[in-house]
Image: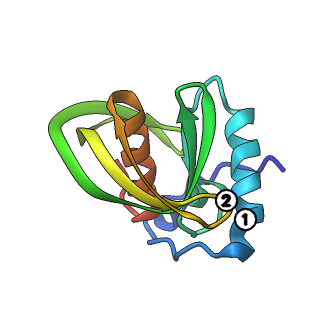
Amino acid sequence: MVREIVRDPIFLRQKSRPATREDLPIARDLLDTLRAHRESCVGMAANMIGSAVRIIVFDNQGSDLVMLNPEIVKASGRYETQEGCLSLEGLRTAVRYRSIKVRYQNEQLQVRLKTFTDWTAQIIQHEIDHCSGILI
């Protein structure tokens, strides 16, 4: 189900709780909402649709990927960039890393460890910031 985008910075600044099996319907809604906003959005965190839970979805080089409880365990290649956000107006400066290693759970709650680079890494970092209550 496509859900409304949350734009309240007070809500968006809250840290999200860990995701559980019971939160999988939120992941499906998040995917539906991302697909509905495909023209202006490449990634979303669950708090952007009103659920303060650690779930992100994003365009992973042409296919959508869901991550539950993502955490960056290694990062390299620091740089500064400008980013926009569907929940906030305008562009803001953000520090990102060109390569990140992420530990997360897939939709079957299996733990995965994968390295992402460049644009995909930047998207993931932005969405993990959302889960941590960090607004760019």
Q: Residue at x 33, y 34 (%)?
A: 117
Please state which amino acid type lies under the numbered disc 2. Answer: Glu
| Image marks 2 and 1: residues in contact by CB distance under 8 Å | yes
From the top left corner, tell me how far across and down residue 87 is, in percent. Answer: 54, 45
Q: Nearer the viewer, residue 20 or 15?
A: 20
Residue furthest to the right in view is 1
From the top left corner, tell me how far across and down residue 67 is, in percent. Answer: 55, 55
Q: Is residue 52 left or right of residue 135?
A: right
Q: Marks 2 and 1, Cα distance to the nearest angstrom?
A: 7 Å
Quarter-wise, where is residue 65 in the image?
A: top right
What count of labels does the image hold? 2
Discs 2/1, front: 2
Q: Is residue 118 visible?
A: yes
Q: Which residue is mark 2?
A: 107
Q: Residue at x 76, y 43 (%)?
A: 32
Look at the picture and state if 100 lies above or below 14. Answer: above
Please tell me whether mark 2 sits on a helix, a strand or a loop. Answer: loop
Quarter-wise, where is residue 134 in the image?
A: bottom left
From the top left corner, tell me how far across and down residue 82 is, in percent. Answer: 29, 30
Q: Which residue is mark 1?
A: 24
Q: Earlier in the sequence, mark 2 or mark 1?
A: 1
Q: Residue at x 71, y 45 (%)?
A: 31
Q: Nearer the viewer, residue 48 or 19?
A: 19
Pointer 2 local density, CA inside 10 Å: few below 14, some 14–19, many at least 20:
some
Pointer 1 local density, CA inside 10 Å: few below 14, some 14–19, many at least 20:
some
Q: Is residue 121 left or right of residue 76?
A: right
